[in-house]
Image (cartoon, rainbow, N blue to C red):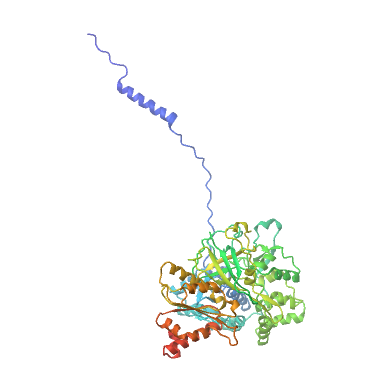
Amino acid sequence: SPAQQEPLVSMTDVFLISLIVGLLTYCLFFRKRKEEVPELPKMQTIAAPARDSSFIEKMKKTGRNIVVFYGSQTGTAEEFANRLAKDAHRYGMRGMAADPEEYDLADLSRLSEIDKSLAVFCMATYGEGDPTDNAQDFYDWLQEADAQLALVALQVFGLGNKTYEHFNAMGKYVDKRLEELGAQRIFDLGLGDDDGNLEEDFITWREQFWPAVCEHFGVEATGEESSIRQYELVVQSAAGAGRVYTGEMGRLKSYENQKPPFDAKNPFLALVTENRKLNEGGERHLMHLELDISNSKIRYESGDHVAVYPANDSSLVNQIGEILGTDLDIIMSLNNLDEESNKKHPFPCPTSYRTALTYYLDITNPPRTNVLYELAQYASDAGEQERLRRMASSSAEGKALYLSWVVEARRNILAILQDMPSLHPPIDHLCELLPRLQARYYSIASSSKVHPNSIHICAVAVEYETKTGRLNRGVATTWLKNKVPRERGSSSLVPRESGSSSLVPMYVRKSQFRLPFKPSTAVIMVGPGTGIAPFIGFIQERAWLKQQGSEAGPWLAGGVVAERQDYLYRQELARFQQEGVLTQLHVAFSRDQAEKVYVQHLLKKNKESIWKLLNEDNAHIYVCGDARNMARDVQNTFCEIVAQLGSLSQPQAVGWAQ
């Protein structure tokens, strides 16, 4: 048989050829080509300049040898710090005022690296002996610090109020703690009392402090106090009108585009949803306002404070402009002549003179002596100029004249300009000299358990006649009184600006004024007049807890009402008593009978039940209101009750009550 012929292509070859063709087909038609990514030029990353937290390096760089730190809540301590820093040039030294929040205070141990150096602390006390907001970090550092300050020279001036229990607690603590760390005190601790004459306390201390500095460092005064401008005026062109502050506290346009968190530098514009008069008649106007905080993420607790940024009366602003012959709508900026200073402007700039005088500057309080000294140069009448300089001096006659003509007569800057016709300072210098208009604090009159989306305020409109016959009105309460309530949810229809008749720039400040942790703990509350505000929040919270099934302890509320028509929250309190939230309610009407009845009389009248609450139920006592007279009288009455029914001596009763 013929031989078999081999096939030209084997099965293996067919398989391999098919595999290759398949791969080529996949690559050509089905595989997604990798997109070409164009090479972009690499962007050079520019790091934001880091804030220099070393005040020592800044002092070296700028040739300063005195640093004055301030713990300030209302601006007074900051003002005193600036005045002390400015004083330094009279002694051949250079000073700088500094916010402790902006620097690392651990650098105090390096202060001796600078020749003839000194650290001064102007420290205000806030609330129940607390540090101010900007001094909280410094306070925390002091408590833990183990720094060696043996070669550091220090000085402290405290700002407080004797009517409060913890008078000048912060100033005393800073002085004591720095000395414990080894720092050397140059002069006695200064303690200013705002219940008396804080300005005179500061001047008296300052005129003895600087001679002590001279003796310590072996220097002499180089000349008299002189007027030195800290800021220069720059008038803005109309082209930059879009970047002008219109009342914002921090970020430009922050009122138009609100972003949490909200605080002192970024207040929330709350809609006023209720503004009603609480009393039924009389000359006084007591009011209840409700602020809508929906969608703000603001949280508060009973006992906290709400801070509001008010605006000055436009008529006062206009009168200042008329006297000085100034166009108040000029856009300007005051720029710090010290380029190294962290504080570039005295208030948000650029802005108009009208905005500055309305939202940023205090034009209603009597100006301090340093302002009078600076203004004196602009009085064309020799007699008026001499009078201003005398009131700004440290002589006994000058202090007495300042006290009577300015402080006791309650002359603000407008009244001084009116009563001294030859005085015509440049408006830019006046704006540089006037202190900042500060936020006003009110005890919150609501509980977040019951009102999570609103904050309530209870206030009385301040209005009085001065010795010169002028009618002075409180800045914040007059401004609040005129707020027009709108329905909740209508905030989008209200212009988002600080000058709106229905909006209030606000934020919440935490407080130590708190209810006992256990709802069963007995509570005694004493709140005359608007002092009842935080207790309304307390009672609302206890009522809410009772509804949740918590055991509520005995409650006793006492208040002083001038007349029956001034009985605040009458219906609410009656309802709480009817529901058993308030065990007892005692109200004194001090003017409804021949003999005035005050809260201490109520306490004595009910001393047996009060002693039972204190002795058997371990009741907590809360007092809110007039700290100057009422609080002291109430404390003394409690001590008398404890001494009498507890068979204790007066010193023992005082210790027991505390």
**Displayed quadrant of residue 404:** bottom right
Task: State how many labels appear.
Answer: 0
Q: Identify the residue shown where x is 71% and y is 58%.
A: 237
Residue 617 location in percent, x, y? 40, 79
The residue most toward the top is 1
Residue 511: tell me if it is visible.
Answer: no
Residue 585 location in percent, x, y? 50, 78
In this view, the residue in front, 273 or 335, is: 273
Residue 20: tell me if it is visible.
Answer: yes
In this view, the residue in front, 214 or 3, is: 3
Relative to 139, 274 lies left or right: right
In this view, the residue in front, 467 or 525, is: 525
Quadrant of the rendering where the N terminus is positioned:
top left
Residue 162 location in percent, x, y? 54, 82
In this view, the residue in front, 658 or 594, is: 594
The residue most toward the front is 578
Residue 85 location in percent, x, y? 60, 75
**Displayed quadrant of residue 468:** bottom right
Quadrant of the rendering where the C terminus is positioned:
bottom left
**Displayed quadrant of residue 226:** bottom right
